[in-house]
Amino acid sequence: MKRVVITGMGVVSALGTDVATFWDNIKNGRSGAKAITRFDATKFKTQFAAQLPNDFSALQFLDRNEVKRNDLYTQYALIAAKQAIEDSGFDVSAMSPYDVGVIFGSAQGGMETFEQQVREYVATDHEPHFNPFFIPKTLVNMAAGLISIKYGFMGINFTTVTACASANTAIMDALNYIRWGKAKIIVTGGADAPITEASIGGYNALKALSTRNTDPQAASRPFDVERDGFVMGEGAGVLVLEEYEHAVQRGATIYAEISGAAMTGDAYHITATHPEGKGAIKAMELALLDAGLNHADVDYMNAHATSTPVGDISEAKAIHAAFSNNNARLSVSATKSMTGHLLGAAGAIEAIISVKAVTDNVVPPTINTTEFDPQLPHDLHIVTGSAIEKTVNVAMSNTFGFGGHNAVAVFKKI
């Protein structure tokens, strides 16, 4: 079976629009949460999110037509893809364009465009007029399509939609298509731009979001006894996955190997995870089997933990059960405490965090967690407060999505 490695990475988030800045903020435990400025949020129960900096402009990275014709989620995807492709340094003109593909994830697609166009339609008392780019801007597959169009990648191209597991699903598919010899390189990851009125209002209706409006930066507190919901985030993460021999032959910089991945379904509830984490346990076990590793090999776990009352406990129980013989040395952190929850992009930026943990031998912290929920397994080593230095040969990244989708990826030193 062919080996697959990561040769490029790119990120757009509230904590940075390049990997170096993003990773520095993650290592140093900084929060990206702040008051929403994109619309008047004062009428909502939740009035904050991990929004990109107010001075962010896509025009710093894309031309005017790309910005005009694309929803924010696609803009984020294109920016992160540009970084990752340049970081990888491969030249599609030097190989068959059919050997380079794009597999990309998103949970919601062009939500902002959809809201804006429907609002204008409702307010119109004459013949409805829709923007000719309305449909392309809202389609959830458009990020994958536009990355391939912009760079001439003519290989396999599709989009995965598994709610908050979308990016990890895309990464797993990219891994397998390269293993099967269907591509040499696949640009993969995820993007979402859910800081919109409908998204904030909808998640408020589900009682999923934190309402800690007086202290946004302390709102995301995974595993903490006072957690009250997640913090919405936005952005994109992109990784270039490449067949190992191809990367070596062209002298590429190799960050880490993606050695395994797996998916399961909870078959339990539309939004809640299984209370005992049955599907999550199996996904972790299958990912390790796929990687040819055992539980004792894993040094770091980037938990999905979103700071919700039910989900955090379910995942903690699952990790504890899956690593019953390794809990003493396994280090766990929940980086959504800093980034917020980027929905379909979460798995991609957390894959980047996992890769950086492997390359730099650093376990990032879980911030804001000051008193553990007493329901947590007592011997689970959750890193809080500050990052720790530790040899990280293998890192695992969990993502779980509404509908019961569980997707897990495993990264290791090359």
Image (spheres, rainbow, N blue to C red):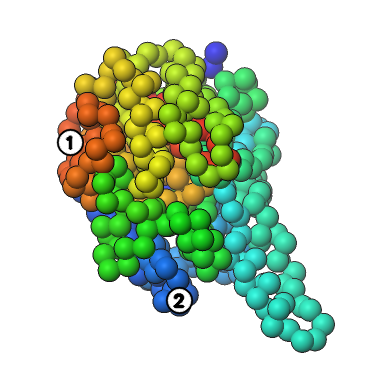
Local packing at callout 1 (Cα closer than 10 Å; few below 14, some 14-19, many 20+) is some
Single out the mark in the foreground, 1 or 2. Answer: 2
Q: Residue at x 67, y 72 (%)?
A: 117
Find residue 388 and name its label.
Answer: 1
Q: Amino acid at mark 2?
A: Lys
Q: Amino acid at mark 1?
A: Ile
Q: Secondary structure at mark 2?
A: loop
Residue located beneath label 2 in the image: 43
In the figure, 366 relative to 331: above or below?
below
Q: Is residue 185 visible?
A: no
Local packing at callout 2 (Cα closer than 10 Å; few below 14, some 14-19, many 20+) is few
Relative to residue 207, is residue 63 drawn left or right?
right
In the figure, 112 relative to 191: above or below?
below
Q: Is residue 381 visible?
A: yes
Q: Secondary structure at mark 1?
A: strand
Relative to residue 171, is residue 336 drawn left or right?
left
